[in-house]
Amino acid sequence: MVNRQLCWYMKTDVGEQVPQRHRWTVALVNAPRQISLIRERLLSELSPVSDIEEHFEMAIPKSRGLHFEAFSFSSDRGKIERPERVYNSRRLHYDRNLSVVRDEASWEEYLLRLN
């Protein structure tokens, strides 16, 4: 059984004069409506953001309506200053496994290993 959660990974480009040098990759497990709200709060907390890239989205079988969504974006901010405003749960955590570029099959494997 997969639990509701928000996982993130952030990579920083250390080059000089690089606009929006932090590249965030996020994986969310929750109800579709909640995913939209959490995503909106995250993007607002780390704004301004650009280069939003959708990676993968699917309904999780036998989960009572939970969905999985993964996406990336660039930001000037390298830290979530107020994580409780984004996702007020112990299940907001850094995940180094999100540093890997994935295809659809490997996103499904990632989802299976989340818990």
Image (tube, grey):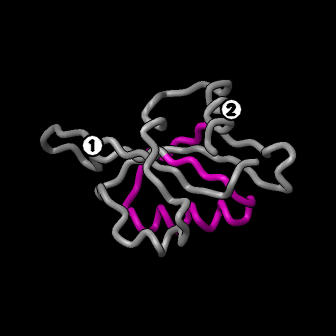
* Mark 2: amino acid: Glu
Task: Identify the residue position indicated by label 2 in the image.
Answer: 108
What amino acid does circle 1 point to? Thr
Q: Does the magenta stretch include residue 33?
A: yes
Q: Residue at x 38, y 48 (%)?
A: 74
Could you say which quadrant of the image residue 112 lies in?
Answer: top right
**Place of residue 13 in the rendered image (x, y in percent of width and height, measured from the top left):** 24, 39
**Vertical side of 105 occupied by 65: above or below:** below
Number of marks in the rendered image: 2
Residue at figure coordinates x 65%, y 29% from the top left: 109
Q: Measuring 74% from the left and 59% from the top, which residue is drawn there?
A: 32
Rendered position, 89 above or below 53? below
Mark 1 secondary-structure assignment = strand
Residue 12 lies left or right of residue 83; in this view the side is: left
Residue 18 x, y percent position in the rendering: 21, 43
Left or right of residue 65: residue 87: left
Label 2, secondary structure: give it.
helix
Residue range in magenta is: 26-55
Which mark is in front, 2 or 1? 2
Q: Mark 1 points at which residue?
A: 12
